[in-house]
Image (cartoon, helix red, strand yellow):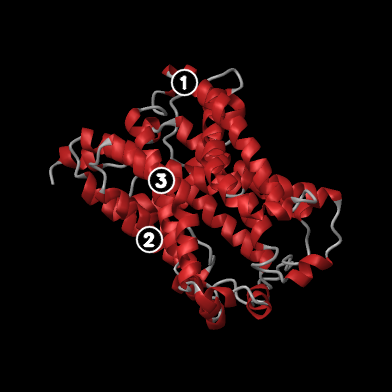
Amino acid sequence: MNSGNCDAAAPVTSAARVGELDVLRGFALLGVLVVNIMSWLVYPWFATEAQTDALAVTQADENAQFMMMWLGADKANTLFAFLFGVGFAVQMERLEGRGADFQRIYRRRLFVLLAFGLMHLLFLWPFDILHLYALAGFMLLAVRRVSDRVLLGVGLILAFAARPVIAFVLEETGISGPAFKASFNDAAIMERANETSLFGLSGEFFEVGVFGWMASGYILAWLFYAFGRFLIGAYVARKGWIQRSGELLDGWRKVALICLPLGLAGQFVAAAIDLETWEWSAQLEWAHAWVHYPTVPLIAAGYVATLILIFHSPAKPLALVFAPVGRMALTNYVTQSFVIGFLAYKAAGGPALAGNAGPALLIGIAFAIYAAQTVFSHLWLSRFAYGPLEWCWRTLTYGEAPKIRREALPA
């Protein structure tokens, strides 16, 4: 390979990044952390229903739980998946513009991500999304040449309908079966909560947990759920709406004014039904899916538009706080798993908070963890060009280690 081709295939430098993407990724990671820590440390993942019911629930706990369901649940992973699709299209445009073999490079990138995801899944975090993103990324790679109309149309259908439709089919046909249900009985929950090793979970855990979930078929629901959001992200990037966001602020204002209120209203109702906030909420259980799934993409779009508007306003420093966390998204995501695992499992002297901490305390812990990650990311990137796992990802993808240390600025 000649030097020109080497340059063409080189990883994107810090100067070539789209700053808005880093801000959006950092914001999404805050949501992922809050939702994960408040979901996994309570029923039905690491605490039994009896343990959860025995907690002394305060008004602050009820408010924290409602806020998480209203503003975070499903929105953070929607935003994260959308940004993966945006990043895919941006990288394709840049690499092909340099004359590089995008398909070969991105295929290697996805294989490395899949390897990271499987290690993360098998040895640390049974709810890993990296392996799903890698699989959905291969699907996106296969359809990268389809028209904009197909990209958007299929993306919207999958974004709104993939999970509820696939889940309905699995339940009606009995495919989900006892394997999936067994992962939520008290014995399985206690197996997770009492796990003695943070690295290398027990065989029983996998039998009724990870493998049960995969065998149930629900992995397909999440795979197409992610794929639909990838397609929408790729469509937005093709249009250049984020790359040229500074020129399109009027359009982003319209998105914020329309999508954010509709999304907030719809998700407020969905959260109230899910948590039975109103006396008559149980009577609306049938309507939850019809309200929840259509308005999740709306509120996520509202978040994107609002952050872009802040990024291009005098309040830009508020948005830039998220950027270093977003630039180290892979490192920070995996680090969050370590911390949540430490808090949940009885390993390495962890506090075993599962079933012993209410939502208000957990959300406070989540924000404290994120604050620490923000400080660490700022300090790390002041000296290094890439996060540790980002550097490994680029090295394995391109077969050549990029310089990790930042060069000293001239005096």
Tag 1 or tag 3, which sits nearer the N-term? 3
Q: Amino acid at mark 2?
A: Leu
* Distance of label 2 from label 3 (alpha carbons): 26 Å
The answer to which of 5 and 273 lies nearer the viewer is 273
Would you call the spot at circle 2 few (<14 residues within 10 Å), some (14-19), or many (20 or more)? many
Q: Amino acid at mark 1?
A: Gly
**Residue behind mark 2:** 114
Would you call the spot at circle 3 few (<14 residues within 10 Å), some (14-19), or many (20 or more)? few
Tag 3 or tag 2, which sits nearer the N-term? 2
Question: Which residue is drawn at the image coordinates 20% and 41% (left, top)?
Answer: 100
* Image coords of residue 1 (percent x, y): 13, 47
**Residue behind mark 3:** 157
Element type at marker 3? helix
Question: Which residue is drawn at the image coordinates 86% and 61% (left, top)?
Answer: 56
Is residue 165 placed above or below 86 in the rendered structure? below
* Image coords of residue 17 (percent x, y): 40, 33
Residue 303 - label:
none
* Distance of label 3 from label 1 (alpha carbons): 23 Å
Element type at marker 2? helix
Is residue 40 placed above or below 300 in the rendered structure? below
